[in-house]
Image (cartoon, rainbow, N blue to C red):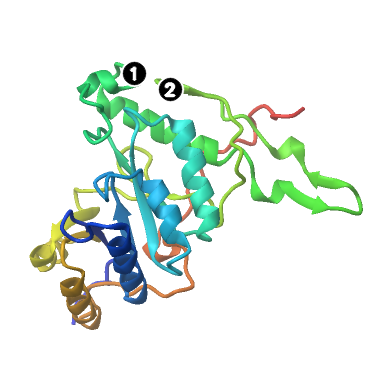
Amino acid sequence: MSNRNPVPVGVRLGRGSSLTIRGLVHAAERLDRSATGFVVLGTKSLGYEPSTIAGFLARRTSGLGLVVEAAVQRDHPYNIARRTASLDHLTQGRVGWWVREHDDETELGLGEASSWTSAPPRDRTEDAVIAVRALWRTWPADAVVGDVESNVFTRAERIRHADHDGIFTTAGPLTVPTTPQGEPVVFGPGSSDVRVGADGVAVVAVDGIDDAIASGVAGLVVEIDDVDLWIRVLPNLVARGVVKARTDKTTLRQYLGVDLPAEPDLSTRRPAFI
């Protein structure tokens, strides 16, 4: 048995793991029935936009976390915020955003010229995370009243502008209320909820799991091509107490043990409708 707490684990499906939509659905359904915490969906998953794939898988899974990749060189923060928040409602709190600095699958052969901005990739990415997280806070869920008798449907004064003015400029409000887990989980740099690398979440192959655990990582993403192999390996990892099993009735944030950050606090920002 391990002498430390079991770590949460997700998987990223490699190119050889599912070559068709049917294969991807079958893989996701099997992962959903296992103890796997989440699956990372990238632009290399069938070549489709990851949040579209996540929406398709949402109704075919019940507990598996769905983490979508997006790089801000081609994807504006407002669009990322709206898509991921919508998905988090659709899945009842199972969505995360895997932040990428650059995605050569979406650059249209233009390289860095494909970016919205000429700012360095790390700077624009960290700024985008700040902008997205502000947008997620613009419409608190408790602002939705829905009282037909009093004819009060929304407390409009609670809905705020984001007013982010950095490398990216966003005002908001978002068109989607605060999500079931407060906001989707952010994997990546800067003000992210989950740090990738440097003893945060390690990305490893199946045969690198024990070494990563021994190094003291806080979580794992295992790159797999063979779902059958992974499902055979996982129960042993859970039984040894090194990997945290997922239960069906949990949000991704709860599974990861990540609290909702206090910031950004938009309570002093200007109201959107007054």
Location of residue 111 (image quadrant): top left
* Contact (Cβ within 8 Å) of mark 2 with mark 1: yes
The residue type indicated by label 1 comes to Thr
Q: Nearer the viewer, residue 43 or 251?
A: 43
The residue type indicated by label 2 comes to Phe
Q: Position of residue 166 (x, y in %)?
A: 43, 21
Per the image, the residue denoted by label 2 is 168
Per the image, the residue denoted by label 1 is 117
> For the point 47% across and 68% down, which residue is it?
250
Residue 95 visible (yes or no):
no
The answer for how far apart the CA atoms under marks 2 and 1 are is 8 Å
Q: Is residue 7 left or right of residue 274?
A: left
Q: Tell which circle, 2 or 1, labels the residue nearer the N-terminal end.
A: 1
Q: Position of residue 92 (x, y in %)?
A: 53, 61
- Label 1 neighbour load within 10 Å: few <14, some 14-19, many 20+: some
> For the point 11% across and 68% down, which residue is it?
210
> For the point 47% across and 34% down, which residue is it?
79
